[in-house]
Image (cartoon, rainbow, N blue to C red):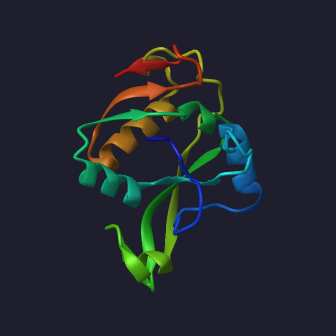
Amino acid sequence: MKAYSSCVGEGPFTCEMFGEEAEALRAAGGEYGAATGRPRRVGGFDVVASRYGVLVQGATEIALTKLDVLSYLDKIPVCVKYDVNGQLRDDFPTGVELDAAKPVYEYLPGWKQDISGCRSFEELPKAAQDYVKYIGEVTGCHIKYVSVGAGREEYFEM
């Protein structure tokens, strides 16, 4: 599971960002199609969709990837609920309700430093540690691995 959201192709993507905010995240994460070079759709971490994904897959552990991508941010966007026709929801809607869903964002503190050299949870800045803990709590799933770069060795086990 990525530390933020991305999407390829069409269809509902509730937490999608646009404009300069999206361009910056896309560039930081290298979110372009490998074959086509087409820009991927990006957004903040989606608690609602991620919790649902953990549930339907029966996941018991998560490998949290691309944490390092968020290092440029002063504050980190997290989609915590959906606004569906004026009703705040934290369950994953389907059909026309998903089409109507709008993101409700909260922001967590950023860490504004390179974390690619970290090889343990304890080496992460406190704000990055808090973010990892938060993702585990809101998804209800243990985070076993955290990647802090694209290299094969740029990760650690929790």
Q: Quadrant of the N terminus?
A: top left
Q: Is residue 10 above or below residue 158?
A: below
The residue shown at (50%, 23%) is 124
Foreground residue, 82 or 29? 29
Of all residues, the one furthest to the right in this rendering is 20
Foreground residue, 109 or 81? 81
The residue shown at (59%, 23%) is 115
Q: Position of residue 135 (x, y in %)?
A: 39, 43
The residue shown at (26%, 54%) is 56
Location of residue 82 by image quarter: bottom left
43 relative to 123 in the view: left or right: right
Q: Position of residue 84 (x, y in %)?
A: 43, 80
Q: Is residue 125 above or below residue 73?
A: above
Location of residue 7 by image quarter: bottom right
Q: Position of residue 129 (x, y in %)?
A: 44, 31
Q: Position of residue 47 (x, y in %)?
A: 40, 55
